Amino acid sequence: MPKILLVDDEENFRTSLARRLTLRGYETIDTDNGEDAIKLIRKNPDIDVVLLDRKMPGMDGEQVLREIKGFRPELQIIMLTAFGSMQSAVEIGRLEAYSYMEKPCDFDELVKVIDAAREDKVHVMERYEVPHVEKGSLKKWLLGSHNSRPGVIILGLLIFAVMVFMPTPERMMNLLSSPKTGQMTDVNVGYASYARMKNGESIAQYYSRTAGFSKTVVDEKGSKSEIPMSPSDAAFRAKVMLGILVIAALFWATGAVPVGITALLVGVFMYFLGVLAPESIAQAYAKDEVIFIFGVLAMAAAISKTGLDRRIGLLLLGPATSLPRMMFLFLPMLGVACSFLSEHALIAFLMPMIMMVYAGSVRIAGVRKDSALVVMFVLSICFAANCGGPGSPAAGGRNAIMMGILSDYGVAPTFGQWVKYGLPFVPVMGLVIATYFYLMFRRKIKVSSLNVSSLVRHASQKIGPMNTNEYITAAALILLIFLWVVYSGDLGLGGPVLLIIVILNMFRILRWRDIAGIQWDVVALYASACALGKGLAVTGTALFLADSFINLMPEFLRSGEGLAIASSLFTGITTNFMSDGATVSAIGPITVPMATISGSHPWMIGLATAFASSFAHMLIIGTPNNAIAYAMAKDPLTGEQLVTLGDFLKHGAAILVLSFLVLWLWVFLGYWKIIGF
């Protein structure tokens, strides 16, 4: 039964109202003062709604409201008063009471407000990250709710313990203990730091030396020597990273705990189980890519605040006069644009406009929410941007890494050659993504007609001509893109965006309050992905995973198109669990030498590996695109997360399969056969 707390110093009113609510099926408890009300709320966490009198002896209603919201911000409170005023109504609204009603009020109207408050409580709980757990059985408790799933937490910890304490696979021990000879036949040639290893040094010895885990021993003569960790100690840390990978992927995919907490959990395991030294873990969490994510979210806040997002949206979304044109014309164009410009920046600029279009569409249609529409919008645009990666070497750091690997073997393609082999994939994949989402969602959408171009144009016209702040922000944006295109090799991606943030703050366009309000959990998430990638690489876990996959391949997949298919399959799956750059860094040094050994052209295998590293669709840790889209896909009024991790997992898995099919059939077995190598 719904539980209602009545707080009113008028005994007759309180008793009468409690009796009438009980007849309507509510469970009621009551008190005549604010102090006892606070004690009752602390004692009864299952109270659904509070009916609070404003004028009482001792603590008045506003004081009680302020106190309750301090420790139970999600609790729905309806303020009742016979002494209403505009000032008190404003104050009560500021303190986030659900409603303000004057006594005496119509009982049926009061019941409607109580029921509406109970329905809205779920959204308020989500905004304040309070778990909504249904009571009644062990099963319900284990299933929990978003951000609180005890069953998944227990399962994840059990899996982690099993993986860490299982016997070390013989192949893992062999990879970690074999010395480097400098020959292409070395079993550890695919190790991320193979080129920096000394001849005769094993992965365990290199890892021990560079991570600072070697022990200094003094013999009887006073001579000092360094004793590296044993292969078994290195294997233990490799198994820890394998367990961290599994538990992080499980928690992120299911929403077992908040995204940011899982991000911190990665570091907790790495710290306390000794994967890296503390300062190395901190450095892994603070990479340039993490600063870039933070900067892009702050920059997006400035663009949205000034209204520049509407001008950009009008430019990019002008042709989208209907839903089919939005899907089948805009998405391929976006993918091609992302082949030559920063797809992360384009997603950051587009997302505020997309959310504005969504809000305008549901308002015009007269519906509160259209889950199908927002999921279709956000995920189709995000995945189309991801699949712009194969188009050119300028599409991302992963491509630059592959160019470097191919350069080490003296066979790197030129910019034009890369475009020749990669760009035809992009518009075709954009059309495939458009077809999937159009067929999947067109009958589920509540909004009957959709003219994105008209909505964007109307939103742009409402704010009038561009003002000074917009011109300054636009100039800063152009400068940022220029610095990214020309100087990212020297300044990275993070440095330029920090400069722009400082400039916008000096012009009083982007204030610290705006910066503090960004989605810090997403920043933490991507930081943990960087740390996860480093841990997998340095411990040799990434090599073990790649080696295990390759050894499972049948003979016909070890050369030519077969090897390209196998390399892309493993890369595409792996890149969903670690950053795309880390994936290419770990897998590229394995697949490119395999091409040489098998007699395949290195371009075929290297490009197949790089292309598939763009397929990070399933989890938001694989690419900044997913992280940015997820962070901004919130209801502007309620703060509700409109696109969930489950949406990414479900539809991302489908797009991942389609990406493989297009890559294999259209690229490997299609136009690559025609143009040759």
Image: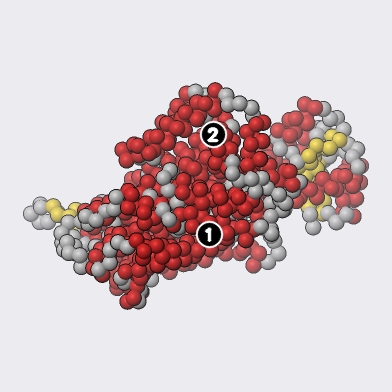
Q: Residue furthest left?
A: 221
Residue at mark 2: 303
Give the quadrant of residue 142.
bottom right
Categorize mark 2 by other alpha carbons within 10 Å: few (<14), some (14-19), many (20+). many
Residue 598 in percent (x, y) is at: 26, 70
Question: Helix, strand or loop at disc 1?
Answer: helix
Name the spot of residue 6 as percent of width and height, x first.
82, 44
Observer able to see residue 153:
no
Locate residue 105: give its quadrant: top right
The outermost residue toward the bottom is 555
Does residue 276 appear to the left or right of 83 in the view shown? left
Label 1: which residue? 432
Residue 202 relative to residue 137: left or right:
left
Q: Quadrant of residue 150?
A: bottom right
Distance, label 1 to label 2, CA atoms, is 31 Å
**Quadrant placement of the N terminus:** bottom right
Q: Is residue 476 above or below residue 159?
A: above
Measuring from the top left, give residue 665's x and y in whole percent.
44, 66
Kind of residue sitting beneath label 1: Val
The answer to whether residue 241 is above or below residue 302 is below
Q: Residue at x 30, y 59 (%)?
A: 603
Q: Residue furthest front?
A: 674
Instruction: Report the residue at 24% width, 65% height from top.
Output: 596
- Front one among 364 and 239: 364
Viewed as shown, does residue 571 lie left or right of 201?
right
Q: Nearer the viewer, residue 468 or 13?
A: 468
Residue type beneath disc 2: Ile
Tell me the crowding category of disc 1: few under 14, some 14 to 19, or many 20 or more residues within 10 angstroms, Cα based: many
User: What residue is at 69 percent from the left and 45 percent from the top?
Assistant: 361
Residue 633 can be seen, yes or no: yes
* SS under mark 2: helix
